[in-house]
Amino acid sequence: MTDAELAAHLAEVAGRILIEVRESGMFEGKALGKAGDQTANQFLVHALREQRPEDGLLSEESKDTDARLSKDRVWIVDPVDGTREYGEARTDWAVHVALCINGKPEIGAVALPGLGMVLRTDQPIAMPASSEKPRMVVSRTRPAAEAVAVSEAIGAELVGMGSAGAKSMAVVRGEAEIYLHTGGQYEWDSAAPAAVALAHGLHASRIDGSPLIYNNADTYMPDLLICRPEWAERVLGEVGKLA
């Protein structure tokens, strides 16, 4: 398999595993989220160590070490992005598998198992025309104040949604034009979504316009902008005014 084929295959299989864990009826509530996270993580970690033993690896659900810092190629995975949505049997959760090369999100796949879909860097989909009135995806439970302020400034419609992967892929799929996040994230929350978004010709950056750089010693990456290219300058400008 190529790296892109591997990423897509792993994301798709992990998604199937997660649905089977949920449908087993053995877990509920927080126990379901924990069982799903750990089971999918074991699959992803063991598969990557078997298939790409020389590469570095960072996963939300595994203890991090500094071994990856000396690697040019590092896989960054999030077994369940949106544990709450997964546990509630919603569709707005995701599985992230990304390969970052020299810090750049080059290859990746985001599975949306609730929709039976995998979006990937090597098979970009045709994007529908942009909406005349921009739509901005935000947290369905706690929209960030900055995102609300920017939406008001540009006249955007707010669309509440679950996980970071689901929100990012909503832009890729043409369900929204803008995903602006300022509430705190980690590298595994955005590596695969950023890779897929960039492969589809979208803008992906920090909210100060700087590039997304991965495989840092500190994995905290608090902000993110993924949007249609024509909205990037305007959104970044409005964010700058808030700062």
Image: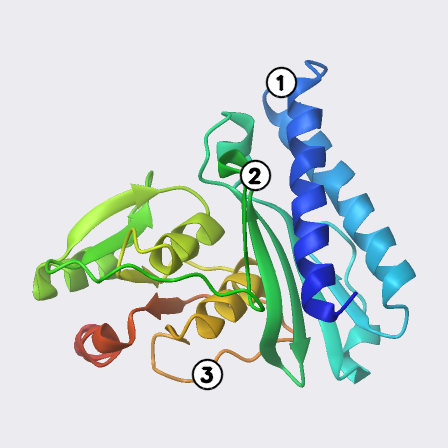
CA distance for labels 2 and 3: 29 Å
Answer with mark 3 or mark 1, whichever residue precedes in sequence. 1
Q: Label 3's element?
A: loop
Residue that label 1 marks = 28
| Place of residue 86 in the rendered image (x, y in percent of width and height, measured from the top left) | 54, 33
CA distance for labels 3 and 1: 39 Å
Residue 139 is labelled as: none
Closer to us: 29 or 116: 116
| Place of residue 174 in the rendered image (x, y in percent of width and height, measured from the top left) | 31, 56
Does residue 212 appear to the left or right of 12 in the view shown? left
Picture quadrant of residue 162: top left
Neighbour tally class for label 1: few under 14, some 14-19, many 20 plus, Cα within 10 Å: few
Closer to us: 77 or 23: 23
Which residue is pictured at 75% across the width and 84% down the height?
A: 72
Residue 211 is labelled as: 3
Which residue is pictured at 33% across the width and 38% down the height?
A: 141
Q: Label 1's element?
A: loop
Which residue is pictured at 87% across the width and 63% down the height?
A: 51
Q: Are marks 2 and 1 in contact (CB under 8 Å)?
A: no
Picture quadrant of residue 76: bottom right
Answer with mark 2 or mark 3, whichever residue precedes in sequence. 2
The relative height of residue 131 versus residue 226 in the rendered view (above or below) is above
The relative height of residue 162 versus residue 206 in the rendered view (above or below) is above
Front disc: 2 or 1: 2
Amino acid carrying label 2: it is Pro
Does residue 9 appear to the left or right of 221 in the view shown? right
Amino acid carrying label 1: it is Glu
Residue that label 2 marks = 113
Amino acid carrying label 3: it is Pro
| Place of residue 229 in the rendered image (x, y in percent of width and height, measured from the top left) | 29, 76
The relative height of residue 193 versus residue 28 in the rendered view (above or below) is below
CA distance for labels 2 and 1: 19 Å
